[in-house]
Amino acid sequence: LCSITVGYRKRSIDLELLRQKIVNEGDLIHPDIVKVDMFLNHQLDIDLLDEMGKEFYRIFKDCSITKILTIESSGIAIACFAAKYFSVPVVFAKKGSNRNIGPDTYTTEIFSFTKASTYTAIVSKKYLSSDDRVLIIDDFLANGKALTGLLEIVKQSGAEVCGVGIAIEKAFQPGGKALRDAGVRIESLAKIESISDGTIVFSE
Amino acid sequence: LCSITVGYRKRSIDLELLRQKIVNEGDLIHPDIVKVDMFLNHQLDIDLLDEMGKEFYRIFKDCSITKILTIESSGIAIACFAAKYFSVPVVFAKKGSNRNIGPDTYTTEIFSFTKASTYTAIVSKKYLSSDDRVLIIDDFLANGKALTGLLEIVKQSGAEVCGVGIAIEKAFQPGGKALRDAGVRIESLAKIESISDGTIVFSE
């Protein structure tokens, strides 16, 4: 058991590496939008995702999580690696109203600023119930619309939200503050305080 | 190193377990459609996915794979677990023409029988090049339209397709045979020979 033990004693995540990747590999496609297709939203850096999953486990391991909830597509990979450490299933909310997942669903409407339109997020009632203790995981938190939708879905199920794990939070947008003020425990691995003149500043 | 070695010596995947899950947890929503939302397409059974990833590694480990290509959303989880064993990045093709992934893309049109409509699959040129040796991974193979689209994207990139790993193949539909006849190496973990009167029969 020696090697495994040593493995788990390693520092859980090199948050500095995540920050460096955001700075070095992110594309500033708009004054306040950083695109991280290189490692999180199109190409996936597996070792980084695994470290992020491990870090979410370190943070929430005492919460008796029974299920991880995310939303397709970019949340799935991080949620999967976290779920491996928690030994619980992932459920991903599906987007779009015409998805054939049966009649018994929790649904909510989510406004996407990126696409300037509203979509429906759906979870089958089979996979989330009042017995569940849920960790929500997603890639980005900015205005908080997707997260608010996922919280609404958990509320409909009667399950308890034990926490929220976010890869990258844009702290200069209102979602994180508003939801924390409402009592939601949100842990973000990288918090961007500001983006100006091509420079990304992180919160401590 | 003893424990890790023992771990890797374990049988790579219990294919019988995958079959049992298809039979016991799959929903026959149509005479020839089995829905596996319980463990693969909506809720994700992480240990099973990890075993599937390990099995794809066992099959293709000598192919010098440099990248795993899949398509959102249901291929992402399997691809990620496989990628962990191969130590290579995943790239997932995005669906829809209005996705903001830059001007330099490989694109192809894919017809979906499930939705009876055509969508565009896109991969940024940044993440696939002629140097790559690609393993394509997807959840289902039936008519082969999605897989044909992914093969077309790899062809546009100049990369080499070393193989295709599929979780569940519906062998009574024409995709697998046609693409194997065209010379593509396809390995499916569960091959469904027929579905009739609610009974699923697997190929040996």
Image (cartoon, coloured by chain):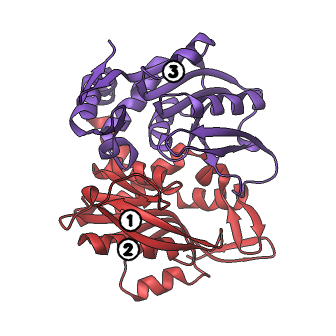
Chain colours: A red, B purple
Q: Are marks 1 and 2 in contact (CB under 8 Å)?
A: yes
Specify the subunit that label 1 lies on: A
Q: Nearer the viewer, residue A181 or B8?
A: A181
Identify the residue position indicated by label 1 in the image. Answer: A136
The amino acid beneath tag 1 is: Ile
Identify the residue position indicated by label 3 in the image. Answer: B174
Q: Residues under labels 1 and 2: Cα distance?
A: 8 Å
The amino acid beneath tag 3 is: Pro
- For residue A151, which numbered disc appears in the image? 2
Within the image, what quadrant is residue B121 found in?
Answer: top right
Q: Are marks 3 and 2 in contact (CB under 8 Å)?
A: no
Say which of marks 3 and 1 sits in front: 3
Please state if A57 lies on the left or on the right of A192 as rendered: left
Q: Quadrant of the C terminus of chain A?
A: bottom right
Indicate the position of residue A62 as horizontal and vertical percent values: 24, 64
Please state if B195 lies on the left or on the right of B139 as rendered: left
Is any atom of residue B71 visible in this view?
Answer: yes
Within the image, what quadrant is residue B58 found in?
Answer: top left
